[in-house]
Amino acid sequence: MGTMRYAFGAGQLSRLTFATVNEIPLPAVLEANGRVTFDDRRVATIISRVTGRIDELRTSQWDTVRRGESVMSLYSPDLMSAEAEYLEATSSASPTIGTDPQTGIFGMPAGSLSMTTNLKAAAVRKLELLGFSSAHIAAIRLPSASVWMRAPISGIIVSKNVVRGSKSIPAISFSLWPPWTRYG
């Protein structure tokens, strides 16, 4: 038993009642009135930012997923060309030694270093706008025809309006909500 302290006056202490707490078994089924709901402010949606086709689905409605887990594979020529542009921009910036007197630093035509840097920055920004993380961008070695879309939060898939083979347009989405509920 713990100690309880009260900041009451003497008149309030006279009205205090003490009782012993007992632990009793509950029935196997406990019926209670209430409502289970989720906080719609904590819902996350996976939205395709490009047109493509759903190649593979790893989840269904009401499945529980963890943050970062692969949810669906999206085939998109737009993503493939963005990766190819990034690889081209990064390979243009690699240093080579030239012998031509008209070449500037790294063997590239004079004044082209800033242009190459700008092309790389633009390619990186394009991939970021398409939803690629910095780690994913850094890991690109070859253009890929498809990309895995991952869960942005851990939770339960409450709506899924895609099937394998369906055309992906930016409006197609999954909705997830955290598995914490409120009772009211």
Image: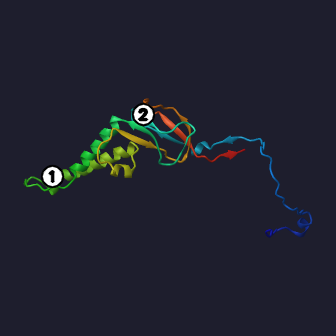
Q: Nearer the viewer, mark 1 or mark 2?
A: 2
Q: Quadrant of the C terminus?
A: top right
| Neighbourhood count class around disc 1 (C-alpha, 10 Å): few under 14, some 14–19, many 20 upward | many
On screen, residue 5 above or below 28: below
| Neighbourhood count class around disc 2 (C-alpha, 10 Å): few under 14, some 14–19, many 20 upward | many
The amino acid type of the residue labelled 2 equals: Ile
- Residue marked by disc 2: 54
Q: Quadrant of the N terminus?
A: bottom right
> Left or right: where does residue 95 sit relative to residue 176?
left
Which of pointers 1 and 2 lies earlier in the amino acid sequence?
2
Q: Position of residue 90 (x, y in %)?
A: 25, 50
Q: Secondary structure at mark 1?
A: loop
Residue 115 seen: no
| Residue situated in front as seen by the camera: 83 or 144 | 144
Q: Residue at x 54, y 48 (%)?
A: 154
Q: Residue at x 80, y 50 (%)?
A: 26
The CA span between labels 1 and 2 is: 41 Å
On screen, residue 5 above or below 107: below
> Which mark is drawn over residue 108?
1
